[in-house]
Image (spheres, grey):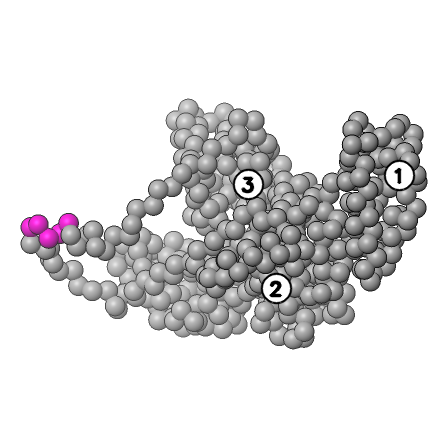
Amino acid sequence: MRAGLAYASPEARTLAAAVASLAHAAAISESAVLAEARGPYPGWNAAKRAEDAIVRNAREAAAAITHSIATRARSLYEALPGAKNAGLRVSVSIAFANDAAAARRTGIAQTALAPLAGITRFGARSDGSFGRLLSEDARAGLAVLGYDDAEIAEFALHAAGRRTLKGAPGVSLERLAALGLTEPALAAIEEAAADAFNLRAAVHPLVIGPELCEEVLKLPPDMAAGKRGDLMMTLGFSEEEITAAEAYCMGAGDLAAATGLAEPHRAIFAGARDIAPDAHIAMAAAVAPFARTALELTLTDKTIARRAELLEAARAAKVALISMNVEAPSITLTLPSLEEEPEETDRRLPAGKETSRQDASAPPAVDVQRKRLPERRKGYIQKSVVGGHKVYLHTGEYDDGALGEIFIDLHKEGAAFRSLMNNFAISISIGLQYGVPLEEYVDAFLFTRFEPAGEVKGNETIRHATSILDYIFRELAVSYLG
């Protein structure tokens, strides 16, 4: 992407193969130099024939690559200092494997062969608000393709959002004002939209005020309190209007429909979900002569029917598949508006029939296994001050860098509140280990409001929080959701 090449293109595979060849050639060359000075590794004589074959095959593969980087690799292969005589000090093996922890440490988005999940990430903006950001990889790619700063800024607004409903399509401040929302209510919506993950979290009864919902919008008390219903659909907005406004405000998350982006360039900024598994296999095959491949394929509802074909293609390309993950399609629930709410009636079935009705409609039970953390695990400790109160957040990670547990320590708080937060952290940890996505927790607890709240000190990315829970899940989102 940074080079302005589409992941599925032959040019991208050529570049990847060239980089892999240079890495392998440099490692082999250094190993040969060390062997001249300190001798080969134990067992070299027995492994000499196999090692020579590996170097020969890699040199031949590099010779077939038309790229300046591969030219540098060929010069290293040809100048191996006495490898045949002195041998190699270490046996060289380069591997491409997913390592989320290494990616965070090195500050890069992807360490393996898989394409980027997307061109946006969640983080803190320059103004202190929290939300989508156009990635540096996408910005660099756009610059390479010749787009100027003004055009890149427009693309960033399309992908990451404008963080305002003023002039938005569908659900706009103007239409909300026409429905009777007051200036303070509109200002509260705008403030919430600056940090919200979705539009429904910003246009919500608890944001604009339950009293206004009851007195002006004439909503029943439970809906005005945010306990049920969908406020925007109740106000008459369609799902299409809500989706359009959310893309305008919170960002589309991609450049698929961005105005001004040339059609040939759209494939360059495609996310992993939009790239066919065949392209993943082809990329792994391109670097296979120089590195071990440990490819993970994620199949969607569109590609799962081809799993046998893809497995055979990987075998033919001599690509090692360590897993084939199946991504289940998301389930969309449509909430009825207030006008569509059915009247409550007593429709109980006769005795003996209720159980059979429930059994017929209930989904089959799924046996979910708990994925326990290793006894020794990595993580980090973040010390911050939220509204004048010290908060210590401890995290525990799986070997792949995924979050598996959290601990929350509050300095000099009452015993009851500290115990409550400790047990809350345990419940979150158990949920994570049973497969509850961190995104679900972030959506649930972002913008929770209670004291202590206010200015955040000691954290480089978060400057303000509406509660300790709001701060904690902002921090986890920044660290683990990118």
Q: Which residues are magenta?
A: 351-355
Q: Is residue 333 magenta?
A: no
Q: Are marks 3 and 2 in contact (CB under 8 Å)?
A: no
Q: Position of residue 280 (x, y in %)?
A: 62, 57
Q: Is residue 417 left or right of residue 167?
A: left
- Measured as percent of width and height from the top left, residue 55 is found at 81, 45
What's the residue type where badge 3 is placed? Ala
Asked if one can make out residue 202 in the rendered structure from this viewpoint, the answer is: no
Q: Which residue is mark 1?
A: 83
Q: Pointer 2 and pointer 1: residues touching (CB < 8 Å)?
A: no
* Marks 2, 1: nearer the viewer: 1
Q: Which residue is mark 3?
A: 402
The residue located at (43%, 44%) in the rendering is 436
Q: Mark 1 is on which residue type?
A: Ala
Which element is circle 3 on?
loop
Q: CA distance from mark 1 to mark 3?
A: 41 Å
